[in-house]
Image (tube, grey):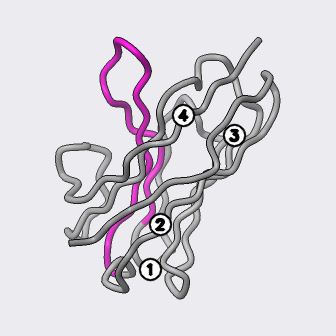
Amino acid sequence: QVQLVESGGGSVQAGGSLTLSCAASERTFSSYVMGWFRQAPGKEREFVAVINWSVDRTYYADSVKGRFTISRDNAKNTVTLQMNSLKPADTAVYYCAGDRGGAITSWWKEYDYWGQGTQVTVSS
């Protein structure tokens, strides 16, 4: 059972930056598609970004494209979400997730493993 642990959340003013990290407990992580999702109070879970195992394909939600960057280091079993130009609308709990399947997907139900989440709050 792969365990995912997020870190790096916090509070920031609009226009600021945060970097979220997700550490995986097992080396099998390197074969997983890894994604970031977020959920704001009263809203459904929302796709943010995804990266494939070979680090040559990424995909972003339109709402974060050009501001967020997903990356991974398979040697360190980590995936990172760099968030720039943050907006109050980005406020949510952010989750990293792992999918054992090979195809990139933005559908949260395809993911097999989830972290506990980290809070990101952006004030205006």
Q: Secondary structure at mark 3?
A: loop
Q: Quadrant of the C terminus?
A: top right
Q: Are marks 4 and 3 in contact (CB under 8 Å)?
A: no
Q: Is residue 60 magenta?
A: no
- Residue closer to the observer: 42 or 48: 42
Per the rendering, the mark at residue 57 is 2
Q: Are marks 4 and 1 in contact (CB under 8 Å)?
A: no
Q: Quadrant of residue 50?
A: bottom left
Q: Residue at x 26, y 63 (%)?
A: 99
Question: What residue did someone put label 4 on?
Answer: 119
Q: Residue at x 41, y 71 (%)?
A: 24
Q: Quadrant of residue 25?
A: bottom left
**Looking at the picture, how far across and down is residue 105, in whole percent?**
29, 52
Disc 2 residue type (three-letter) = Arg
Q: CA distance from mark 1 to mark 2?
A: 8 Å
Disc 4 residue type (three-letter) = Gln
Q: CA distance from mark 2 to mark 3?
A: 17 Å
Closest to the camera, between mark 2 and mark 3, is 3
